[in-house]
Image (cartoon, helix red, strand yellow):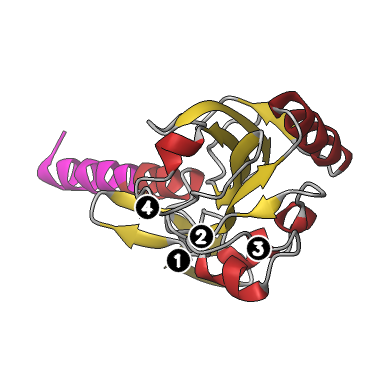
Amino acid sequence: MNQNGNVILVIILVIVVILIILLWLIKTNSITYNAGNPTFSPSPQVSILDDFSSLSDLNAEEASKLYMPNAFTLDDKKLDGPKLTQLQLDSSATEKKQGIEGIEPATCCHVALGTQATQQDVFNFYNTELKKLGWVSTKYDVFQTTTETKIYGWCKPKRLFRLGFFDKKEYAYDPKIGKDWNYITYFTTYLTGESSSARCP
């Protein structure tokens, strides 16, 4: 083969390699191709933070307003009525953000409650009402804290509802806090955002 033939072969090989690379980029969605406008452009990428549910997503859930009847909110000065104030709910809400060690998901409606009902009654209420709203039981991403005696979780895509029970003596670090509490059951509830990769169930 003469020198011109070698040059042509090299050119053909280069073109083939370029085509293979372009096809791979299109297949992996690294770039997009518009036949009407034959130019290549980067595909929009969804950030990890965007993949998590936002605070507004959680507040839009009916479960964010789900509280057991005759369960009272616990306060460091007194026993509040069963109706939660918007200030109490807003003070517990946090928007998702990128933290030093990773994503800190959005949370809302975190409140501590006391009731004369048993733990089983409390669980039955939330289990029944949440399932009516389309939530399913899950153990994924449901971790028990050192102050809790038992925990339960329910999920929807990118959302987690958490119910945790605790002892009065474990929750009230200051002996002045809750000295007049006389409930049978103490528990907390809240919603937290998840990513699309979170299993449910």
Q: Magenta residues, as a range?
A: 1-17
Mark 2 is surrounded, within 10 Å at the Cα level, by few (under 14), some (14 to 19) or many (20 or more) other residues, namely some
Q: Which mark is residue 32?
A: 2
Q: Is residue 137 above or below residue 105?
A: above
Instruction: Label 3: state its secondary structure.
Output: loop
Q: Can you identify the residue that label 3 sits on?
A: 80
Amino acid carrying label 1: it is Phe
Sequence-earlier tag: 2 or 4 = 2
Give yes or no for residue 13 being in the magenta stretch: yes
Q: Nearer the viewer, mark 2 or mark 3?
A: 3
Q: Distance of mark 1 from mark 4, alpha carbons?
A: 32 Å
Which quadrant of the figure contains the C terminus? top right
Sequence-earlier tag: 3 or 1 = 1
Q: Position of residue 3 (x, y in %)?
A: 10, 44
Sequence-earlier tag: 1 or 2 = 2
Quick check: marks 1 and 2 in contact, CB under 8 Å? Answer: yes
Q: Position of residue 134 (x, y in %)?
A: 82, 40
Q: Nearer the viewer, mark 2 or mark 4?
A: 4
Along the line of sight, which residue is nearer the eye, 173 or 107? Answer: 173
Amino acid carrying label 4: it is Ile
Along the line of sight, which residue is nearer the eye, 166 or 39? Answer: 166
Sequence-earlier tag: 2 or 3 = 2
Q: Position of residue 197 (x, y in %)?
A: 53, 38
Q: Which mark is residue 103?
A: 4
Q: Is residue 6 left or right of residue 24?
A: left
Quick check: marks 3 and 1 in contact, CB under 8 Å? Answer: no
Q: Distance of mark 2 from mark 3, alpha carbons?
A: 57 Å
